[in-house]
Image (tube, rainbow, N blue to C red):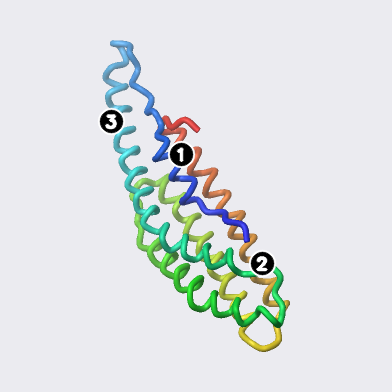
Amino acid sequence: MKKSWIISLITSFVLLGGVLLSPAASADTAKVATSTYSDLDQSYAEFKEYTNQLFALETYEAKAFTALESIDTQVTSTNRKSMYLKLTNTVIPNYTKLVSKAKQIKPTNPQIKKIHATFVKASYTQLEGYLLYQKAVSKNKVNYTLLKQGNAKVNTASVLMDQCEQQLYAYARSLGYDS
């Protein structure tokens, strides 16, 4: 399963750091630059607070993906019970916590709000895919129709997460982060 999470990508921005653009040096634009720089400081602080809140979700993501990586990609009657147990005991509970805690994050910045809405939608769609996987392997006979539907949800979540990543990078660059 492809890990297409934004949390790891955000880490690179914050840990590698970005250099905020300095205000214009011109004396004529000092007043505008100070106002712009002040707005930039606030936006930077909001971005940093948001990324810190996302980092708190990383443990749930890591547990879910570690369990997912240990599942065979080919579902058979032989391994379906193992898959069901990993989904039921580890993946879904951790992903449910991730989605629940993500929904509790309430950014005030309009741009971050939009990015976060995409993040929540992607996370929830991913969870729906995992729930379909679970249902597909819950009986003695694997339901391949449900597996296919689960794959479609996970693929949709991946597209949404890519959109979220692009929005986040664009916003970070607008704050002066180098990519």
* Secondary element type, mark 1: helix
Discs 1, 2 touching: Cβ within 8 Å: no
* Residue position marked by numbered label 1 in the rendering: 171
Q: Distance between the residues labelled 2 and 3?
A: 45 Å
**Circle on res. 38:** 3
Query: Which of pointers 2 and 3 lies earlier in the amino acid sequence?
Result: 3
Q: Where is residue 41 in the image (x, y as percent from the top left)?
A: 30, 34
Relative to 24, does residue 177 appear above or below in the rendering? below
The residue sitting at the top extreme is: 27
Q: Distance between the residues labelled 1 and 2?
A: 30 Å
Kind of residue at disc 2: Asn
Kind of residue at disc 1: Tyr
Does residue 92 appear left or right of residue 40 in this picture?
A: right
Q: Where is residue 49 in the image (x, y as percent from the top left)?
A: 32, 47
Relative to 67, does residue 138 appear above or below in the rendering? below
Discs 2, 3 touching: Cβ within 8 Å: no
* Secondary element type, mark 3: helix
User: What residue is drawn where x is 35% and y is 53%?
Assistant: 53
Query: Which of pointers 1 and 3 lies earlier in the amino acid sequence?
Result: 3
**Quarter location, residue 129:** bottom right
Which residue is at the front of the view, 55 or 39? 55
**Mark 3: few, some, or many residues within 10 Å (few <14, many ≥20)?**
few
Which residue is at the front of the view, 24 or 85? 85
Kind of residue at disc 3: Ser
* Secondary element type, mark 2: helix
